[in-house]
Image (cartoon, helix red, strand yellow):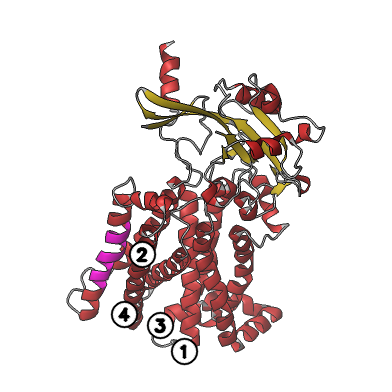
Amino acid sequence: MKEELLVTARDNALIDPGLQIWTWEVAMYLFLGGLTAGIMIFAALATVRNKDQEAPFTTARLALLAPIVLSLGMTTLFMDLEHKLFVYRFYTSFHITSPMSWGAWILIIIYPVSVLQILSTLRTGYSFLAEFVDRLTIGRLILDWCERYRREIALTVIPFAVVLGIYTGILLSAFSARPFWNNGVLGILFLISGMSTAAALVVLMARQHSEKELFTRIDLVLILAEIGLVALALISLASGSAQHLEALESVMGGSYTIPFWVLFVGIGLLIPLLLETLEILGVNKSLAMLAPVLVLIGGYALRQVVLDAGQESTWTNYDTQYSSEVLQRIHRSD
Amino acid sequence: MTRFAMVIDTKTCIGCGDCVVACKTENNVPEGLNRDWVVEATSGTYPDLKTEFRSERCNHCSNPTCVTLCPTGASHLWNDTNIVLVEPEKCTGCKACIAACPYDARLVMHPDGYIDKCTFCHHRVEKGLDPACVSTCPTGCMYFGSIDDPHSEVSHLLKTREYKVLNPETGNEPNVYYLI
């Protein structure tokens, strides 16, 4: 036998009995950050590839959602901070070894980039907003400039948006102390998932049939890629050391098995894959709106499951841990 | 860089928990939180059982992942040593360092919200004193000093006794040693 008891009480908040430092606020941010990246990438790609006719919503209107979605995400992220008054400290330094520091700066840089992207299509996409800007001479000049360099702005947006989409995954994978996260695939997986959720959003919001169809096809490819990446992530854990195998166990029979396989893989990937395939083949169009909703749910489920299972995975496992419940029961019997 | 190490003799530790009480008193650790803790590890098959007591805390690693992953530099090394401290005025409470610690040795200091941890009592070390836990230990099983100094007591113990560190495979190079 091997038994490890904590002789002195240890019931540190958020750490014992298992790490629970980050909850839905962070998962929501990871989801919304990925969605923002996807929105900006597709809006830029549609411009670069001249999809004005085929995909008018994506080309001219989608980009406006980016700062709105990102601001929601940054709000939930701020809600998670324990020492909120000192949030400005992210911007008084840059730490090259900390992906979170990179992320903090990327979030600030992405706003002006996003504004340029919005302005470059404002007259076509939101004429009533453009009217306000056009009333001022400087506003008119800016809009003219952005429109003229629309393509160049779109090309600039892409690398920034890709970094935004990928860094959240790299952030988690950089934690060598959490075997479930410590996996290089995570960055690409989060980027592809973010793009998939953005494609789903376009399918939900676009009016034109050709655009819905185009993005259903795009989403289908992205879902297939995501399934491949999930498989790689699992293979990587399965071929790892004891800590990785233990971390894998949490989704292979452990407490996150059902959220992972049912909510993320089943509802978030496989059912939309089936529905979208049927739709493209023209077999069943009655459930056309269901697939993108499920993709969005799946995108959130991925972040939440990875976040939770990762925190639980650890190097330090006491075989028997001190239980605060036991102590409370003793107190009550006094 | 001066490397400070704590050496704890598991053969003479009796698991009394005085180190924990000393720490809480010295550092005003809020109720319900602990910067150090004592583990009683029993192994074997009855009646051939073996018990080991370990007083555990932050390992003040030579390769501290909590410092490399901190986004603001709040987690830092004190005065070119391996002593890892947190500057509350720079800490946003993002909790990255808690996730980054393979020993789960960091905690959120309530209600202020910055991150708190064992400091190796650097305010005592500065004056040439041992950390509170070491100086309190009634069996004298805890030792503290520089392992870069070949003549220090800790260096001597590590040269002459069998020892281990916790989870060396993390690559963090912990500096709390257990004599076994």
Q: What is the chain identity of the residue bearing mark 2?
A: A
Dot 1: within a 10 Å radius of its alpha carbon, few (fewer than 14), some, or many (20 or more) residues?
some
Q: Do the residues labelled 4 and 2 touch (CB within 8 Å)?
A: no
* Circle 2 crowding by C-alpha within 10 Å: few under 14, some 14–19, many from 20: some
Q: Position of residue A43 (x, y in %)?
A: 48, 78
Same chain, labels 1 and 4 = yes
Q: What amino acid is at disc 3?
A: Ala
Q: Please provide percent x and percent y for residue B103.
A: 54, 42
Three-letter code, disc 4:
Glu
Which secondary structure dominates the residues rendered in magenta? Answer: helix
Tag 4 subunit: A
Mark toward the start of the polypeptide (1 vs 3): 1
What SS does tag 2 mark?
helix
Closer to the eye: label 2 or 3: 2
The front one of A187 and B166 is: B166
Q: Which of marks 1 and 4 is nearer the N terminus?
A: 1
The answer to if A274 sits in the magenta stretch is yes
Disc 1 marks which amino acid? Asn
Subunit bearing disc 3 = A
Of mark 4 and mark 2, the one earlier in the sequence is 4
Q: Which of B27 and A31 is in front in this view?
A: B27
Location of the N terminus of chain A by quadrant is top left
The residue at 70%/80% (across/down) is: A138
Which residue is farthest front?
A: B160
Q: Which residue position holds label 3?
A: A55
Position of B172 with respect to A311 (left or right) is: right
Q: Where is residue A257 in the image (x, y as percent from the top left)?
A: 30, 50
* CA separation in Å, label 1 and label 4: 17 Å
Residue indicated by mark 4: A213
Q: 10 Å neighbourhood of mark 3: few (<14), some, or many (≥20)?
A: many
- Visible in this render: residue A28? yes
Q: Which stretch is magenta?
A: A264-276
